[in-house]
Image (cartoon, rainbow, N blue to C red):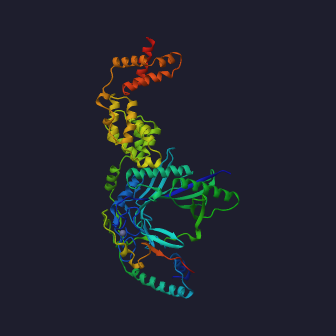
Amino acid sequence: MKYELVSGLETHVELSTKTKIFCSCRTDFGGEPNTHCCPICIGLPGTLPKLNKEVVRYAIMAGLATNCEINLISKMDRKNYVYPDLPKAYQISQYDLPLCKNGYIQLDSGKKIRIARIHIEEDAGKLVHKGGDVYVDYNRGGVPLIEIVTQPDIRSSEEAREYVEKLQLIMRYIGVSDCKMQEGSMRCDVNISVRPEGSEEFGTRTEIKNMNSLTFMTKAMEYEKNRQIELIENGGKVEQETLRYIESSGTTESMRGKEDAHDYRYFREPDLVTIHTLSEEVENIRKSLPELPTARIKKYIEKFGISEKDAESIVKYKNISDFFEKAIQGIENPKIVSNFIIGQIFSTLNNEQEKESFDIKVSAESLNELCKLVESKKINVGLAKSTLLKMLETGKNVSNFISQEDMQSISEEKLLEICKKAVDSNPNAVKDYLSGKEKALKVLIGFVMKETKGKVDALNTQKNILDTIKNI
Amino acid sequence: MVTKEDIIKLAKLGKLYLTEEELDSAVKDMTNIIGFANEISKVDTGDTEFDNINGLENALREDIVEESFDEDLILKNVDGGKDGFFYIKKYQN
Ligand SMILES: [Zn+2]
C-alpha cells in the first residue's frame, strides 16, 4: 500500500524587541548566565508582568504578512506545567483568543499552507545538564516569542522545508526576528502522521520537538514517516507520543507518551488586562509593512525583466535584495545590476552563510556608480566586470581603477586604426586564423582590448578585425 | 467535591510526592480551600457583567531597556547558585 505523510508545524520565532515580553530586561542573545534578569522574569512572588507594546505590534505585523485575520480583542492565559526552565510553574501564553488567526503561506507550487493561529508568549529559560545535575540560566526566560501554528496541510518534508524557508524570509523582511535556527531564535515542532493514499481520515500523530535545523527537520520527518509506515505494515499501531530527534543516529526516541501528556489547565492570566486593538491601528500597521519577498520577486521578473532564477536568488537574502534595491537607483535597466551581483559578487561569496551576512567591500552606491558608467556606454561590460572584481578585493571606488581618459569612448576610426595595428603586430595569429584556426582571432581581439583598456565592444572589434584581414 | 483521585492527579502535575496520610489531609484541606473560594459565588451581582480583570484594557509598556538586577541579588534566594546558575542537584531516591 502507498502511504501519504500528513504534517503540521508549530514554529516558535523569537521577536527582536529590545526588551522582554513582561519586563524591561534586555533580550540580547548570550551574556553571562542570569545577568539579564529581574524579579519579574525569574518569577518571584508578588511581581506583576507588564506587556511590551512592541510585542503586540510585531505579532500583528507577522499576522498581516502571513495573510491572517487579527483578533481585535485578545488576552493572555496561563499554561501550567512544572519544569525548572519555567520559574513560575506556568508560562504566560494565549489560549482561545490568539492575536492572529486564519492565515496562509503560499508555496511555489501555488499550494497554500494554512496558518491556524499566531499567538504571543514568553520563552523559557535554558537548562544545562551536567552529570545528572541541572544548571538554569534565565536570560532567555521571558524573551518574547510568537508561535505560528499551521493546519495539517503539509504532505512531504520538502513542503515543510519550503514553508519554513518562506516563513523565515517573511519574518526577516518585516524585521520582527532574525530567525536564526542555529541560535535558537527559530525552532519547529513537527506533527506527523501517515495514512493510506486517498484516505480522508487522519492517522494517529506523533510530535517531534524542537527542531533547530532544516536539514535535521527533513531527515527527522523522513525517518518518522518510514517508522510509522513500517509499524503499520507489520500490524502495529502508532502511539500518540512526543519524540526527540537524535542527530547522531538519525532516529527518534520517545520523550513522553500519551498517558504522560501535559494537562495544562489553561486559565485567564489575571495579572494582565485585555489587549484591545483598534481596526485603524491594524490598518496603519498593514500600511507600514515593507515590501514582502513574493512582491519583490514579482517586481524583479515582471518589471525589471530579470529571470525567475536570478530574482529568487537575490530575494532569498534580505541583505542582498536591499543592496540591489539601493544599487538600481537611477538605473534604466536593473538587469545590469543583477547580473553583476549574481556574477561577480556571488563569485566572492563561498557559502550560504556568507550570502546571508553579505559582508562585502563594495557599497550599493559604488556599484550604482559603476553601473551608470556601463549604462551610459562610457565603459563596456567587460571592463566593468574586471573593475568590480578589483573593487570587491580592495574596497576602493570605481575612480581608483578607471580614469577620465578610460571613460572617453573610442571613435570608430580610432577603433579601426587599432585593429589594423593588431593585425600588423600579430602576423602569426593572422596566419593561424587564415589556416582555419578560429581561436587565433581571440589573440587579435585581446590585443585591441588591451590597447583600449577594454573600452570597446567585443563584437564590433571582431567585425573590424575581420574587415582588416580581408583587406590585406 | 474533591476526591482522592483529583489530589493524586494534581500532585503528579505539580511533581509532588505525597504519602497516604498526606493525601488524606490534602483532600480535607483542598475541600476547605475550594469551599472558601466558592463563597464568592453566593454574591448577587444582578445584571452586572464581570470578567476577572474588571473590563480593564491595554496597560502596555514601551520597549525601553532598564538595567537588570545584579546577578548576586538574582541568586540570593538560592544561596548564590553555582557558577552563576540556578542549580538543581540530581534527585536521589
Ligand atoms: Zn526581567
Nearest to the observer: residue A322 or residue A379: A379
- Say above or below: A101 vs B51: above
Where, quadrant-wise, is the C terminus of chain A in this rendering? top left
Q: Position of residue A228 (x, y in %)?
A: 64, 58
- Say above or below: A353 vs A120: above
Task: State how many labels appear.
Answer: 0
Left or right: A244, with B34 as reference point: right
Quadrant for residue A408, please give it.
top left
Nearest to the observer: residue A341 or residue A405: A405
Nearest to the observer: residue A344 or residue A127: A344
Q: Splitting the image into four quadrants, where does ligand 1 fall? A: bottom left
Residue lying at 50% horizontally and 18% vertically, measured from the top left: A433
Nearest to the observer: residue A170 or residue A430: A430
Extreme residue in the right direction: A234
Extreme residue in the top direction: A471
Left or right: A398, with B37 as reference point: left
Q: Position of residue B91 (x, y in %)?
A: 54, 78
- Say above or below: A299 vs A274: above
Q: Position of residue A416 (x, y in %)?
A: 37, 17
Q: Position of residue A133 (x, y in %)?
A: 51, 74
Residue lying at 33% horizontally and 50% vertically, measured from the top left: A288
Left or right: A53, with A129 as reference point: left
Residue lying at 39% horizontally and 50% vertically, measured from the top left: A173
Quadrant for residue A447, please give it.
top left
Extreme residue in the left direction: A404
